[in-house]
Image (spheres, rainbow, N blue to C red):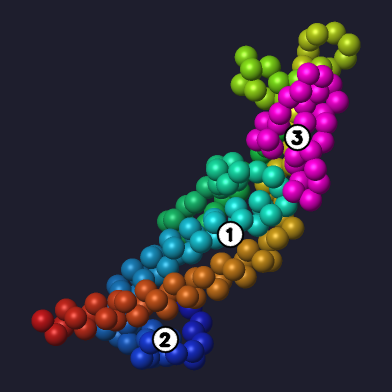
Amino acid sequence: MLGFSAQNVGELTEAQLAREVGLLAPRAVERAERSAISRTLSNVRTEISKTVRRDLALKARTVTSVLKLDRRRGEITVKARAVPLKEYGASRARRWVSVRVKKSRGRRRVAGGFMPMSLGGHVFKRVGRARLPIKKLFGPSVVGELSKHTRHIEQFGRQRFEHHMASRLRWEVQKFFRRRSK
């Protein structure tokens, strides 16, 4: 199920702690695991948001809206949808629209772009010479940026799970002995 190292966790090592909890209350291990998974998922979601926002000029709310947590399965799903240029801090001047997509670069002009407030303030561009049709413009997706940092996110998730699992097992053991002493 889980591999434990011999690092000290309070008074017991992690291996001793797992053995104690498993012998005393098998359901306590399940509770500890569920709690550790839930806490780890929250930590990983925050780390994904921070990692993506280091490169892309997005708000945290925009990045987390693309992430879906499934606590029962213990997974985070990233929706593969393009992010509208509006979310990249689009602002309009008289004859152009400017956006800042990457934090490493400055603001860039979108040639021929416009932002009609009647269409939600999104950035559009005309297709051809006529007034219509127009097309909505999008920037890079969160999935594309996240794919560069997959190894870091997986390593971070493993580390946080081990930490939370040890902490929750320690708590379950303490809870068991408190009930027993009453």
Relative height, residue 151 to residue 91 (above, below): below
Where on the picture, by quarter, is residue 20?
bottom left
**Is the C-beta separation of discs 2 and 1 under 8 Å?**
no
Q: Nearer the viewer, residue 80 or 73?
A: 80
The residue to which callout 1 is attached is 47
Asked whether the viewer can see residue 95, the reply is yes
Residue 45 as seen in the image, left or right of residue 118: left
Going 81% across and 23% down the picture, which residue do you hit?
Answer: 96
The magenta-colored residue range is: 86-112
Q: Nearer the viewer, mark 1 or mark 3?
A: 3
Question: Seen from this angle, which residue lies furthest front?
Answer: 94
**Is the C-beta separation of discs 1 and 3 under 8 Å?**
no
N-terminal label among 2 and 3: 2
Q: Tag on residue 130?
A: none
In three-dimensional space, the C-alpha distance between marks 2 and 1, rounded to whole angstroms, equals 25 Å
The residue to which callout 3 is attached is 99
Going 30% across and 85% down the picture, which residue do you hit?
Answer: 23
Q: Is residue 11 magenta?
A: no
